[in-house]
Amino acid sequence: MSGSGLLPCKLALNPISPVANPCCKSHSWRGPKPWERNATTRFHFARWRHCGGLAASGARAAIQTDPVIGVLWHARNEQEEAIYLGALRQGFSEIGYVEGKDFVLENRYAAEQYERYDPLAAELVAANVDVLVAVTTMAARAAQRATRTIPVVFVVVADPVGEKFVTSLARPGGNITGVGTLPVDVSGKCLALFKEAFPRLTQVSLLVNPTYAAIRRYVEEYRVAAGSLGLTIREVQASKPDDVQAAIAAITEDGLVVAPDNMLWNERKRIAELALSRGLPSMSWNSDMTDAGLLMSNGENFSVQFRRVATYVDKILKGAKPADLPVELPALYEFVINTNTARMLGLSIPPSVIARTDRVID
């Protein structure tokens, strides 16, 4: 090294150990593990080489690392999370961040397997990410178990106070905050709109994932709403993707309502195809499911929520504490109808109902 013109630089084998080069006192090596050689690896290696180059030129200015944002997703891969990963990236872009220049995303995918959440959260914590974004209640719970110090921003969490992620919506009080999802009582509005669109509807099936921690609250709200509307509602269950087809095949009611759940959201295209093949009008809690072919939906716009996550991360990186950042609840609810699906089902939706929609898919 003495003849190379470079200052001594001892790079530890541990990927999260600091780089010892005196020019890099503020630089922590956050490179991926050896089996994760990808664009991020090349990005970090390029920064390390740049650090050595500055040392050779005698520069003494500290190199500031780009923030690393860990994201724990519920689906299998980037393709399945494309809608919301794109929304998250758009959120950062809207506030002036450039990925690969101002921040790095470290994504982990649980593939709808509950046993994967804890080890993946632990992996992100071990990588010393600057902020951990937890997508869904299961991810937030795993992040809470994994760290009490790294800031956590959750999204798509139905009851953050009830889940004990935060002390209150206004004052979270710990290292966790974020964007909550719709209050349970909005579920009744879904049924009311469904009944208004189809006045002769008397019986509906409610498709649920019984393993979802918050589902009993939703089921009770649906039952109360059904009673007030003169509807009979029957619960059909799908605990995993392989259960979906049999659950819908067993439906004998006049319509299908899909209850909130991440696995069911991920299976939205198949649910839409199966409902159509059975001739069932369908109602869901999320417009992505209507885009996928279900008939109607009423609920919040999750893409907006993922864009808001970037704002939370920005505030935290600038020094704000999660304990002091109030949890946001959705301000925008969308009523969406897929009229193409209605035509394929041979159904006519009253103009008065169409007029109330926020968006029509045709």
Image: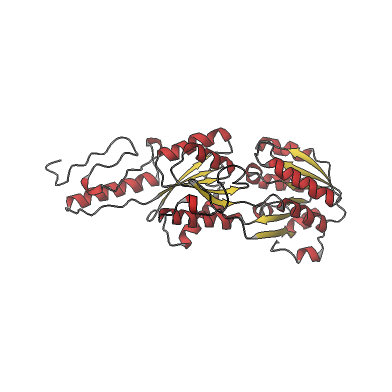
> Farthest residue in the left direction?
3
Q: Please indicate whether residue 335 sits to the left or right of residue 281 in the image.
A: left
Q: Is residue 11 visible?
A: yes
Where in the figure is residue 78, as x and y percent of width and height?
52, 46
Where in the figure is residue 104, as x and y percent of width and height?
41, 50
**Does 276 sit above or below residue 193?**
above
Q: Which quarter of the rendering shows the C terminus?
A: bottom right
Q: Residue at x 87, y 50 (%)?
A: 230
Q: Please indicate whether residue 173 sits to the left or right of residue 302 in the image.
A: left
Query: Along the line of sight, which residue is nearer the eye, 217 or 208?
Result: 217
Q: Please indicate whether residue 57 sits to the left or right of residue 48 in the image.
A: left
Q: Residue at x 29, y 48 (%)?
A: 26
Q: Is residue 278 visible?
A: no
User: Where, by quadrant of the figure, is residue 128 drawn?
Assistant: top left
The colouring scheme, among rainbow, by chain, secondary structure or one colour, is secondary structure
Q: Which quarter of the rendering shows the N terminus?
A: top left
Query: Along the line of sight, which residue is nearer the eye, 183 or 294?
Result: 183
Q: Residue at x 67, y 47 (%)?
A: 269
Where in the figure is residue 228, as x and y percent of width and height?
84, 51
Q: Please indicate whether residue 118 sits to the left or right of residue 62 in the image.
A: right
Where in the figure is residue 97, as x and y percent of width and height?
42, 59
**Does 273 sit above or below residue 14?**
below
Q: How many numbered marks, from 0 up?
A: 0
